[in-house]
Image (spheres, rainbow, N blue to C red):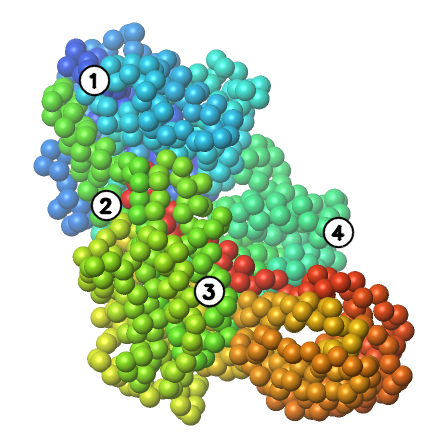
Amino acid sequence: EYLSTRDYNLFSEVFEKFHLTGLVKYSKITALSEDTTAEKGNIRLLTEKLLRGCLEKEETKDSIEGGNHDNQHGSEIKSLGFFASSAALLRQVVHPKNEKKALGAQYTTPAWKQQAQSPTQLNVHADTKRNAARPHQDPALQRSDRKPNLHQNANVHTTRPLILLVDEVDVFFGSEFYGQTYNQVAQLQDPAIGTILQHIWNANKGGGRRLRIGDIQCTQDYQTLIQNLPGFEFLVEHEIMAMLNEVRLVDEEPYYIDKESGRIGYKVMDSVSFEATYGYRTVFAYIKEVEKGNISRKDAEKFIAMHVSCGRFSYANISPTRILGVSGTLDAMGDYEKKVLSSYGLNKFLFVPSVYGKSNFLFDKAGNGLQVDSKSDFFHSITDQIVQERKKNRAVIVFFQNKQRMDEYTNSNFFRKLGRQQMSLLKEDMPIADKEFVISKAATSGQITISTAVFGRGTDFFCKDDRVQQAGGVHVIQTFFSEERSEEIQIQGRTARQGKKGSYQLILLESDLYKQFGIREGTVETKAKAELYAFLDEARQKRHEKECLVVKQNLSEATLIDSETHSFFDALLGRDSRLSSQLFRDLYKSIKKKQMPSDMVIDIAFAVDQTGSMAPFTESTRYTLKAIIDGPQSITKRLQAQFPEISFALRVGVLGYRDVDDNADQFHENTWGNNAVHFTQDMNAAIQAIDQTLSNPFGGADIAEDHLGAIQTCATWKSTNDWTSYVKFLMLFTDAPAHGMVPAAYAGTLNADNYSSLHPRGLTVKDVSKSLIDRDIDLFFCSFNPQATDSIESKLSKALLGHTQNTAQREVVAIPMVDPKKHGVGTALTVSYGKHIVFVLDESGSMSDSWSGVVRAYNAYLNRRRQNQFGSDLVSVVQFDSTARTTIHLVELSNAQTTLDYSGMGTNFDPAAVSAAHLVDSTPSTHVPVVVFMSDGQACDADAAASTFSNLNSSVLSTFGDHLELHVIAFGGVKMTQLKRIASASPRGKVHTSGDTAELSNVFVNIAGGQDVAKILQTEVTKRVMEAIANRLAIEYLA
């Protein structure tokens, strides 16, 4: 909007000189769509008359012609995104007939559009002629605020051809335009509607049980509304359901208040639009702000209405006489974009060389021009780079992806270090004059400008400061990796303009790369500096290819709904109430989603790898699965809180699986009832099945496992009541690669894969994908070794996305079940973990009453390590009194015994220290030793014990490269002098105190270290499942 106004003002004198002032209009795509629709008639007013039962009454010209402007809020927010961009201006030029041969592409109706058009769809210009013969306009319905239509200009004959000039043609086929629709929404006002909205708001504000549709249907206002809209109860019921859902989302999208006009607006590209709405969220925002005193009741009343969708017109169906376009990113266009342009007859592309000669633009993409940081370093790097460039007297412009990230930075201590002098923020909600002022001084010496990405297109940060030029020009920092290369090129174009010098730099946040492109944490570190940009660009291209498929599907749906809308529109214009009512019902059902059901059953099947390598993960897997299906944070409890109008039930299936060579032991299936159904709603029975499945991990033969067989077995369960629910999930838990998909670098590893070329039963990824799609099952791949399983995850996703029946574009949801930084030891095939814990426990006579508590503390340590996925730790135990004995010797923690017998004599420390030293010396190279020494007494040989541990520390330092981790626990209030002396034998020695056995358990758990990973995993897995279920509900039921 800002750039549209700017450009029109720049050329207004030219238009005036050529007598074209009345023939040129700078516009957004929504305004063009509005004008085109208005030529045919006022679909919103006609729809309202239909709903109120008065369509067949005598119509005024205003209700048929050009009246769409009288509803300023009739378009949903989705319709506003694309051409509100600063670089996406529409110039509509109506040329005199003798200028028909202007250069450019003659518009031809695309083949897909010709096939999809309704037989009753009317030509815009033909409508204009036909509408001229309609009855005269009723003065009572005239609107003083009605906006002029382009074709109603006094100087323009309605038969003039329409020329469309698109500035920045790459956004012409962007996801916000191509395949999207301009949405018509009629606003019905009625006292009963206002009362219902206020009632819903009050209930939401008060907390407690959320209202359901039944609570509203029993009110008198609901009955009144049904009487006022005869025959459209389905509409009323659905819209009230939408109100009940959206009242909770009132603050989800930030909004702005213009107190002077009493309007609420939303950010749309480079400005705040007070025409944009978010449906009932905006309605409830008005109610909220009236209560807060920010908006008057009188101003808000006009917005308190029922929003009735009455049509969607496809942006792709625009049909001017000729289309021309310009772009600075033509070379970034791919085959898909060229095909889209070709469908509009745009087949000629001209690359114009710069009149300023060779570019002075500098981007060191293989060096310091690209860096990827962690969260802790990200803002620091941005500030550090700004400071460096400002010291050179350069101007710096920093682009953030959105206002949220920009606000994070400007509210940080790193931003405050820059000071306030020569610092400007460029935001969408600023007045135009303020924007122009910030832009005008952005390219001056020492100036820092912090901006959102929308100003990276078309904004002219022109440099006239010689000091900046001498220092190297304007330096641009982009703090995110653009999802479209054209956007990156545009942002780069904010520097080195018109032959000037300039440089560009990318400073990226690593976690953003995962969210946007699925690049896992740590991957960037494995790439050479010179290869990093190409790697990121390839990831971007893969994402773009997926988006193209989505756009193609959207286009098909938009074309169909456009045709249905025109059919409905024609019936309204013909004042045929019966036909209009039927077409409206069909159209409304197409636009709106089904109503939320009152109850819903969800099927979740757990396929759990039971082979020996999964032993370290059994406890965390057990905890995670149990927490998902039962308890206060279970899926059903959380869904009930999010969707209170639905009663949820869960059915659980459990499959344990081993490898092909385990033969009869390969699959362990659980069934219930006479029909041997694989699912149960009895959570106690499901938990019992989980416990049994995880009780005895063994087998597996080679390293690779039969994941395809496990998925196929689950997906093809065929009992009468298997996979009968609407929402279905299969969650696979493993730590190993699949047969035929062992990472290439480890294909030669001994015993890696006995079936590397072909699945022994002939199964393929394609077979398994088809089974999942046939049953409409979503697959979650939960991996305790993401490196090993990356190949099968990727191949399954690709097969799913490439399947012709996968219209919902489902793919594998990969959930890493380990922290790669914590579990970094090992290879891509096997994961090894770290610690050999040597417990040195005092069992002297004074410990007789406390020994059971010591054993409980020891077990608490083991349990914490198991929950934190350290089941492959090694455990040794030395028990001592006057002598020492080794009761457990180098046993895997997952198999360590839980009972310790008791002796009970005097106390000597050094024999125990010597035994511990022998055990530490036998620690394998895959593990690191840790000693936990606990005593409640003193000994005459404490100095000798300290000396033994000191020598041991030197040995550990030499062997493992670090000092011995030594924990000394003083139990029961013992004097600590001797124990401190022992702890000081290692620089990493630490003394802990414990007054009783309860405290002792806490000390042992704290030494075990880390957060409770099982709880973290349960939270993450449940969150991902919740998101998937919510998405399914939104796709199926929510508008």
What residue type is disc 2 on?
Glu
**Res. 589 image quadrant:** top left
Q: Residue 107 location in percent, x, y?
A: 22, 45
Residue at the location (73% across, 68% down)? 850
Alpha carbon distance from label 2 to label 4: 51 Å
Between residues 595 and 5, which one lies in front from this camera angle? Answer: 595
* Residue picked out by circle 3: 622
* Residue picked out by circle 1: 230
What residue type is disc 1 on?
Pro
Q: Nearer the viewer, mark 2 or mark 1?
A: 1
Mark closer to the chain start, 3 or 4: 4
Mark closer to the chain start, 2 or 4: 4
Alpha carbon distance from label 3 to label 2: 44 Å
Q: Secondary structure at mark 2?
A: helix
Residue at the location (34% across, 74% down)? 657
Quarter placement of the C terminus: top left
Point out which mark residue 557 bears. 2
Category of crowding for the residue at label 4, using alpha-carbon neighbours closer than 10 angstroms: few (below 14), some (14–19), many (at least 20): few
Q: Residue 32 location in percent, x, y?
A: 32, 34
What residue type is disc 4 on?
Lys
Alpha carbon distance from label 1 to label 4: 65 Å
Mark closer to the chain start, 3 or 2: 2
Between residues 655 and 422, which one lies in front from this camera angle? Answer: 655
Residue at the extreme left of the image, as rendered: 119
**Res. 655 image quadrant:** bottom left
What residue type is disc 3 on?
Arg
